[in-house]
Amino acid sequence: MMNFGNLGHVETADEYLDIAFRQAKLHAKEAKVVGTQFQRIQRRELDAIATVARVLTKHLTLILEGFPKLDQLDPFYRELVRCVVDAAQVKQSLGGVNWGAHRVEAIFREFNDKFRGSRDENALLAHKRAFFGRISSVIKKLKSDFAFLEEARRTLTELPSIKTSVPTVVIAGFPNVGKSTLLRALTGSAPEIAPYPFTTKQMMLGYRNHGKERWQFIDTPGLLDRPLHERNPIEKQAILALQHLADAVLFVLDPTESCGYSIQDQKHLMKEVSRAMDVPVIIVLNKSDLASREQMELAAQNMQNAVIASAEEEKNIDHIVSAIGKALK
C-alpha cells in the first residue's frame, strides 16, 4: 500500500535559512571551548558554519528521500501521480534540491579550510560573511523548486491509499444501478470511503476474504459511470491507472431501467469499459427482484454468462463470488 500522507512539509527558502542560522546561534551559545581568545572565536565560528551546513543538508536530504521515485512506484500509482502532478517538473525540482545539497557541502569544505587557515579575527569575520552569503544564495536559488514541491506534496497526500498487491475487482456501471448495495452485499460491511482526485464523489472500497485470499473491491463514482467519450484527458488517464490495478471488472446492469438509463445505453457503456480496462468482465444483471420477465430477457440478450442477482435481497451473491473466483484465476 502506498501512503503519500507521510511526505514531509517543504518549507520556503527563507524558513530553511532561518532554521539553520537559529540552530547555529544556539549551538554557539552552548559550546564550551578552551584556548586563547582567538582560538575560542575560531572554534565557535567553525562550529557555526558546520551547523548551518549540517542542518541545511539534512533538510534537503529529507526532501530527496521523502518524495517517491516515480520509476519505482507500482504502475497504478505511477500513472496516478502523472495524472495529478507534472512528473517532469518534480524530477527537475528534485534535481535542483540535490544540486543544492552538494553545493552546501562543497561550500562548507571550502570555508572550513579557510577558517582553519585564518590568523586573525578580521579574516574570520570576512570568511563568515562570505560563507553565509554564498549559502544563502544557493538556497534562495531553490525558492521556486521548494514552492513547486510543496504544492506537489499537498496534491500527492490527497491520493487514496489502495492495496496494490491483492486481487482487485473494479465495479462499474451507470449511477443508481445498485453498485454500492452490491459492494455491501459482497463484503458484508459498509464500504470504506477514500478520496479520488478525478471525480466529484469519493471512491468506495470493500474487502472480502475468499479462502486464503483477500479480495479488494473498488467503486469509483463519477469515473466509470458514463460514456468514455465524455471524459477529459485526465479522467481517461485515470482510467488507464485503474487498468493497472484491476484484475477483473464487475459491470452492473439495471434491467428495470429505474436508474434512468436504457438497457441499450448500459450495454454500450459496458462495451466501452470492457475495451478500456482490458481485463475479464463479469456482468451482473441486478434488481432481479424488481424486474419483469420481459425486462430480464431483454437485458440478458447476447449475454450468456451474465449473473442474475439482487443486491438488495442478497440473492445469488454466491454466484457472483464464484464468477469472480474464476476470473481472478
Image (cartoon, grey):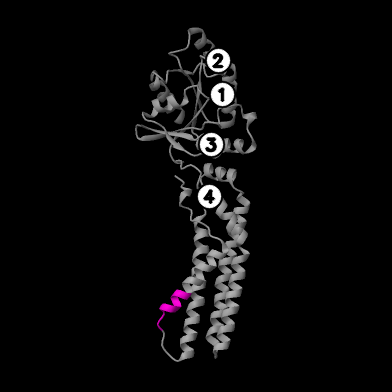
Query: Within the magenta stretch, is there residue 176?
Result: no
Is 72 located above or below residue 228 in the figure? below
Q: Write the residue at 57% across / 88% down.
A: 122
Residue 242's disc is: 3
Q: Which residues are magenta?
A: 25-32
N-term-proximal mark, 2 vs 1:
1
Query: Within the magenta stretch, is there residue 26?
Result: yes
The answer to the question of whether label 2 and label 3 lie on touching residues, with beta carbons closer than 8 A, is no
* Quarter of the rendering containing residue 309: top left
Distance between mark 4 and mark 2 Cα atoms: 47 Å
Residue tagged by mark 4? 154
Residue tagged by mark 1? 270
N-term-proximal mark, 1 vs 4:
4
Give the crowd class for mark 4: few <14, some 14-19, many >=20 residues within 10 Å.
some
Distance between mark 1 and mark 3 Cα atoms: 16 Å
The answer to the question of whether label 3 and label 4 lie on touching residues, with beta carbons closer than 8 A, is no
Distance between mark 1 and mark 4 Cα atoms: 35 Å
- What kind of secondary structure does the magenta stretch mostly adopt? helix
Quadrant of the frame with the C terminus: top left
N-term-proximal mark, 3 vs 4:
4
Residue 18 on image: x %, y %: 52, 68
N-term-proximal mark, 1 vs 3:
3
Residue 168 in the figure: left or right of residue 266: left
Tag 1: residue type? Answer: Met
Residue 244's disc is: none
Residue 102 on image: x %, y %: 57, 68
Task: Name the foreground residue: 185 vs 198.
Answer: 198
Between label 4 and label 2, give the one nearer the viewer.
Answer: 4
Distance between mark 3 and mark 4 Cα atoms: 22 Å
